[in-house]
Amino acid sequence: MTDRWKALDFAVPPADVEEPESPVLLEYRSGDRIALITLNRPHADNAITTEMGARLTEIVETIAVRAAVRVVVLTGAGERAFSVGSDLRQRKSMTKEDWLRQRQDFDRTLYTVRQLRKPILAAVNGIAYGGGSELAQSTDFIIAADHATFGQPEAMIGLSAGGGSPVFLPRVLPPGKALQMLMTGDPITAQEAYRLGMVNEIHPQAELLDAALKIAEKIASNSPTAVQAVKGAVRLGAGQPVEQAIAIMMEAHWRSAVHHDRIEGIGAFNEDRDPTFQDPDF
């Protein structure tokens, strides 16, 4: 026996527990304007199997073309974990070819989340390790339960992290702190993640989903065309020279300036009423 894994607060998923009917759940809220995605393997700390990754990709791709959906909330089932990353029990018996094929499938999942035009936020309800933490990092922003933790333990099992954390962590944390997490595998608390700017808000576990849905409702009440445009401007402008980033921003701005939603929004302000914004074309 070893103390090596104790700080991670999770173990290999049990082998004798019946799997849920679907590893990922999709629910529409607020008249279909909000899509709530739930990673649904709580018995295994929502560890990501090949089947879960494929289902998550399918759901995000479906949401991407559903015009009525304006915001996506991603969370985990249960009170313990958002997701501890790849299911190591499933990986134990994989051949090299199986492993590489699963890696390609997971790359597609993360790419699909990153490329979603609609806003997507993670409500991290507990442990977020490895690919689970990277999945949260792939969204637009994170809010977390007060007992949540974030970690990248890949180096502890002989892997270099490959789901985005070497790219994203140094952008949301001080680079030295990001490297320390990636090299040691030691997790950080929600409080430290909030202090350093990785997490936007912290809430008690019982209040987390309501807080996430409240944010989603506020975003959904705005022009989806404008929201998607400004998200695109931020994403595409990141890392660009200033004037190039400004040009990207202005392209989004001018497209919104000639859109019907601008007329509706300014009219609603002057008439002291709630605006009625159109669903985007795609």
Image (cartoon, rainbow, N blue to C red):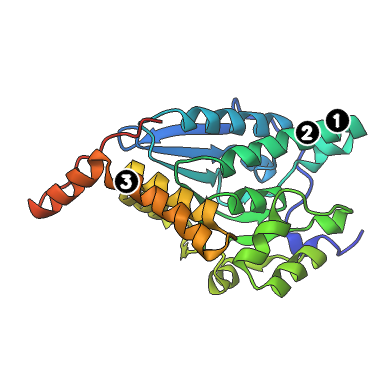
Q: List x then y, in percent, for residue 100.
A: 84, 35
Secondary structure type for disc 3 = helix
Secondary structure type for disc 1 = helix
Which residue is found at the position 79% from the left and 46% from the top? 12
Query: In front of the other: label 3 or label 1?
Result: 3
- Which class describes the residues within 10 Å of circle 3: few (<14), some (14-19), or many (20+)? some
Which quadrant of the rendered structure holds the N terminus? bottom right
Vertical position of residue 231 compared to residue 190: above or below: above
Closer to the camera in the image, 250 or 210: 250
The mark nearer the N terminus, 3 or 2, is 2
Q: Is residue 235 left or right of residue 1?
A: left
Q: Amino acid at mark 1?
A: Asp
The mark nearer the N terminus, 3 or 1, is 1
The residue beneath circle 1 is 98
Q: List x then y, in percent, for residue 149.
A: 63, 62
Which quadrant of the rendered structure holds the C terminus? top left
Question: Mark on residue 102?
Answer: 2
- Is residue 49 something that shows in the picture? no
Question: Mark on residue 63?
Answer: none
Q: List x then y, in percent, for residue 183.
A: 81, 66
Q: Amino acid at mark 3?
A: Ser
- Which class describes the residues within 10 Å of circle 2: few (<14), some (14-19), or many (20+)? many
Marks 2 and 1 in Cβ contact (< 8 Å): yes
Closer to the camera in the image, 109 or 29: 109
Q: Is residue 36 left or right of residue 241?
A: left
Which residue is found at the position 23% from the left and 39% from the top? 260
Question: Mark on residue 256?
Answer: 3
Closer to the camera in the image, 279 or 262: 262
Which residue is found at the position 85% from the left and 58% from the top? 156
Q: CA distance from mark 2 to mark 1?
A: 6 Å
Which residue is found at the position 23% from the left and 46% from the top? 262
Closer to the camera in the image, 171 or 36: 171
